[in-house]
Image: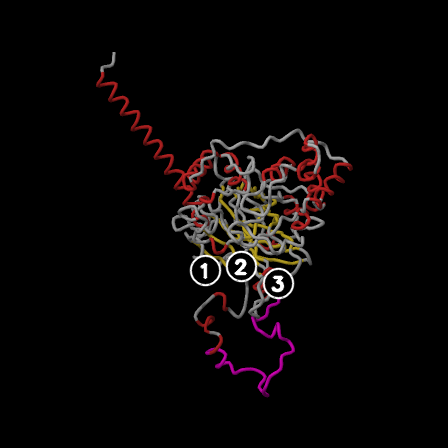
Amino acid sequence: MLNKKSIVSNLCFIIIVTLNLTIAKDLSGKELYRKYCLSCHGIGGKGDGKLSYLLYPKPRDFTSNLFKIKSTQPGNLPTDNDLITTIKRGMPGTSMPSFNFLDSNELKDIVNYIKDLGNINNKNSVLVQIPDEISKTDELLKLGKFIYTEIGCNKCHGESGKGDGLSSNSLVDSWGYSIIPRDFTSGLYLGGGQLQDLYLRFVSGMDGTPMPSYGNLSEMLGKPKKDENKLAWSLVHYVKSLETERSREEINVPEDGKIIALAVKNNSTIDQLLDVSSSFWEKADSYSIPISRLWQSDNINYQTIEVQAAYSSKYIAIKLEWEDSSMEESLYRVQDFQDAAAIQFSLDGSMDFHGMGSKKHPTDIWFWKSEWQFLKSANVDSDIKHVYLNRVSDSDVESYPDVFNDTAFLSGRDAGNINSKEKRNTSVENVIASGPETVTPLAENLQKVVGEGSWDGSKWRIVLARELRPKSRQKVKFKKGGMVPVGFAIWDGNENDRNGQKMVSTWYKLELKD
């Protein structure tokens, strides 16, 4: 039988253990937040992180208690599951990526820490009750179209749902930033594209945006309350009907986050791997990887790139294919920007910050550039004459003396800057990074990644390749049966993309399957 002293000792022990477990849990959420969220959302969760200036729309201010995606009644805070789902799915078409590579406990820990930062008390939040779906009919679509116009959806989202309504250019969010209405024809929605998801958006509204709640359509339209569900489902079905056939096409997003590389003949040459028309690319699985623009434009803010991978006993190759309606391959004028693509790999196997890693967990990046591809393929020097073919001189001197050229204009070349080379024998630059704004090119003798790219009038197709196991510690190493974290980025010159203005993916896992 325990005496009073033993009981007190045991109680103290239980309290101490409980406190330690609580602290450990808090630290876990804090560490995860600082690893993945801090750069954008800031140390206090106010949306003022170091990288927030690069992002549009701006990162969420958790202390404002305004959240776009929720399953609760208007005026109610989102549930924990709402927050977890948003973090896991991401918000397509914004700079908020998917963190589906985090496990359920990690997601819960991050949400608990975010709730502490924002002083979010959602215990009494009331869920929206989604009624049984009413099947789509021509009559229902007709009613939905009437409601769409009657309540003013067309004023922001446009008559055909492209987000080009009369008010679309004057909308601002609760923080005073311009906001672009959703393009319904794309089939992409911040909170998911299922019918139930859209029902929640209409009924709950999207706090912090001009999107109000339409949970009282019967009252707004002067209809009987018993018709509320019919009115709501008709609007949902009509908005879904605005999607184009292209947006309804099935895409192969890797749900488990894995991209499987095809094993090809061991004697396959690097030239064979670089050939986009090689027969083994028809055998390799193709994966649709979603990418979102960090700084939104009026045009494309979300798309997918098709990714394939193949490897032999000596080399690995990765093929990227994405839609691009124009080819931009010139950087000679200050108003011009090039198309480009990059593949980043984690050097130590950890999925750290997807924005080029961190000091403790750097990344190896293969950076393909369309301008370099042009110079390499055409076997020409980089020169302004490629753009201004019909230029005239204000004197009878046709060209500057070489000595003047060298001292006045080619200092980068003379300093050994890889970006200032006159002749190009590669279209790829291999760089390393330990976080945003830390890109460092490898020495020229270590530039071993090769690539080939071509534009067919509507798409870029490129292949990047390299040896599996280089000697340099600054380069990622691949092995049969192993997995390496991988991410992707695309720059569209027609959208003035450059540097941090680009479209990016989250982390995936590249597996060299036996």
Instruction: State the separation of the CA atoms marked 1 and 2.
Output: 11 Å
Q: Nearer the viewer, residue 363 or 490?
A: 490
**Residue 127: within the magenta?**
no
How many angstroms separate mark 1 from mark 3 (CA)? 23 Å
Residue 400 is one of the magenta-drawn residues: yes
As shown in the figure, which amino acid type bears the numbered disc 2? Val
Residue tagged 1: 441
Question: Does 453 appear above or below 133?
Answer: below
Instruction: Give the dominant element type of the magenta stretch: helix, strand or loop.
Output: loop
The disc at residue 428 is: 2
Q: Position of residue 220 (x, y in %)?
A: 67, 40
- The residue where tag 3 is placed is 328
Name the quarter where the N terminus is drawn: top left
Q: Quadrant of residue 216?
A: top right
Say if residue 510 shows up in the picture. no
Q: Position of residue 105 (x, y in %)?
A: 45, 33
Q: Earlier in the sequence, mark 1 or mark 2?
A: 2
Give yes or no for contact between labels 1 and 3 (Cβ–Cβ under 8 Å). Answer: no
Residue range highlighted in magenta: 378-407
Pointer 1 or 3: first along the chain: 3
Residue nearer the viewer, 352 or 368: 352
**For residue 374, side relative to residue 9 (left or right):** right
